[in-house]
Image (cartoon, rainbow, N blue to C red):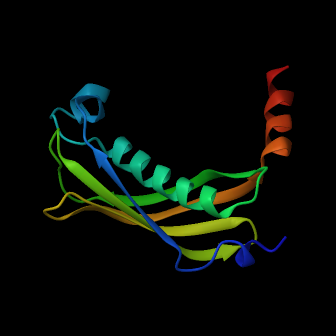
Amino acid sequence: MEWIDVVKLGTDREQDFTVEDSHSAIHIGSGSHRVLATPWMITYMERTARQLLAECLPAGYSSVGVRVDVRHLAPSPIGGRVLVRAEVIAVEGSKVTFTVQASDGSEVIGAGQHERVIIEEERFLRRVAQKST
């Protein structure tokens, strides 16, 4: 299967998230303030890209994140809304590259790239099971 025929360049998705206290830097130990933690911003970006691919892929296939290269540019308060956008910019074999951006209504708070690899779920789970025995 040629993934470039399944996952089209320029395909994009937006998702909206609410920053909860459990997403704060002080809560997870990555900082000392009640603002969105960088690991959670990255999680929002990965979730958006994963969902975009999930909507494109046939049954039995999924994706896993393999690379994140983003900058956290500005703080976002607890209770605030974050809008994340992911767009497919490259498909090379089973590797899909996205631009990702997060904004909080006032400004862009994070931006960069994220890579995911398309996997055959059954094969992937067999590999995991071999490591569990």
Judged from this view, the residue extending furthest toward the top is 133
Query: Percent position (x, y) of residue 52?
Result: 54, 61
* Quarter of the rendering occupied by the N terminus: bottom right
Query: Percent position (x, y) of residue 103?
Result: 25, 61
Q: Quadrant of residue 21?
A: top left
Question: Residue visible at 74% across and 78% down?
Answer: 5
Q: Quadrant of residue 132?
A: top right
How many numbered markers are drawn? 0
Between 126 and 48, the one nearer to me in the picture: 48
* Quarter of the rendering occupied by the C terminus: top right
Question: Residue visible at 46% across and 55% down?
Answer: 48
From the viewer's perspective, is 32 left or right of 97? left
Query: Relative to 57, does residue 62 appear above or below in the rendering?
Result: above
Query: Percent position (x, y) of residue 66?
Result: 61, 53
Between 34 and 3, the one nearer to me in the picture: 3
Question: Residue visible at 51% across and 68% down?
Answer: 98
Between 113 and 60, the one nearer to me in the picture: 60
Query: Relative to 3, does residue 49 appear above or below in the rendering?
Result: above
Q: Quadrant of residue 92?
A: bottom right
From the viewer's perspective, is 38 left or right of 97? left
